[in-house]
Amino acid sequence: MKSLKKILKYSSILILCLIIVGSFYIFNSGPVLPNDTDEIIEEVLANPIPELVKGKTGTVISQGVKIWYESILSQESPKGVILLIMGISNDALGWPPQFIQSFTDAGYQVIRYDHRGTGLSDWLEDYDKEAPYSLSDMANDGVSILDALEVEKANIIGVSMGGMIAQQLAIDFPHRVQSLTSVMSSGNIFDEELPPISSEVAVDLIKVAIKYSIFSSETNMIKLHLASRIILMGETAQNLNIKELSEQVLYNIRKRKGYNPNVSRQHQAAVSKSGSRYDKFKELNLPTLIIHGVMDPFIPIAHGKKCVSLIPNVDSLWVENMGHDIPNDLIPLISNKIMSTLE
């Protein structure tokens, strides 16, 4: 009995040591935030949150799921309609305001929406992991919004997982698509002939999620998003707009439903379920633009180049000093290239 007690005692001490070491490792991991981060966050927390939703808002029901959207009109006669599809776990507010404004200033109506599981769309409390929804289901969400707004055709722009959904939308609903732009995305994320998604980046994102989520606060939630953005920027020399991102996170926390901790797994399941779109690419008969950052640390640029090799009537833009992110400094270059495809 004494031997058993001694074993249990030393086992408890060992476990406690491992917890302390693991905690130290987690709390000292992740990127170093800019020196003025705390000062800027304090300023944002102390001041009124600016209104980030200024267009016409509404909801639609897509396959029994409520989807929230915002339609932002141009002050000019509309040249056309752009439907923006954001990446994994992200809601409509993830789009840089300058990116949207570049299109509305040019005369386009811009529609953005919250993916199922994010923002003000349904969070699917009864989600069945044995029967996950697919990218086709998520593409249907976007088409349901076009139906509600009586938009016959739209120019579809998607980033990362949103690029995969945009590709699927063009495949499933070609008569509803004027043009397709897929940014920092892939036609088959599991292509064994291409470099895979970076497991190192994925682990880094998990570590900062643990680091800033153990003690929940508005400040830590903002820092989590800042750290995640820095990781996805990779080794690029881009500046991070701390104030803009802090206001976006705080707006989501205080004026919306915050962030769904379960949605990342749901979106990953949708990508896994949907598989490759390579075979369908050759059927695309519309102006298509593939954009990818040369320094993307998450989805290697080889995935963008593979899409170009398979899609007819395609153009491309390989962006120097761009990671897995759309930095403000590169918005003019990217939006102008997209508009040249639209026009």
Image (cartoon, rainbow, N blue to C red):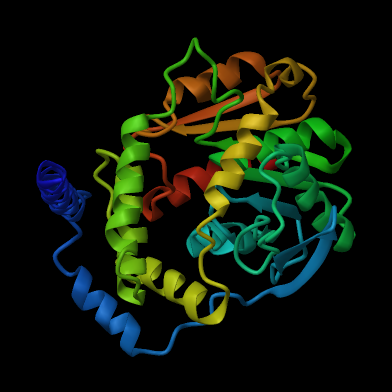
Q: Is residue 1 left or right of residue 87?
A: left
Q: Position of residue 307 (x, y in %)?
A: 59, 21
Query: Which residue occupies 60% across, 75% down?
Result: 53
**Which corner quadrant of the image does residue 113 belong to?**
bottom right
94 to the left or right of 341: left
Give the x, y percent position of residue 55.
68, 74
| Residue for point 65% across, 60% down | 114
Which of 317/127 is in front? 127
Pick out the residue farthest to the top.
Answer: 193
Q: Is residue 74 above or below residue 232?
A: below
Q: Residue at x 39, y 69 (%)?
A: 244
Which one is in front, 39 or 333? 39
Q: Quadrant of the C terminus?
A: top right
Q: Tell which of 197 and 1 is nearer to you.
A: 1
Q: Residue at x 34, y 75 (%)?
A: 217
Q: Is residue 224 left or right of residue 80?
A: left
Q: Position of residue 132 (x, y in %)?
A: 70, 41
Rendered view: 113 above or below 309: below
- Locate residue 176: give its quadrant: top right
Mark yes or no: residue 295 visible: no
The location of residue 70, given as percent across then percent down, is 69, 68
- 115 left or right of 174? left
Tell which residue pokes out farthest to the front in this image: 1
Question: Which quadrant, please, contains the N terminus?
Answer: top left
Work out whether residue 308 or residue 171 is closer to the camera in this orientation and state it. Answer: 171
Residue 99 visible here: yes
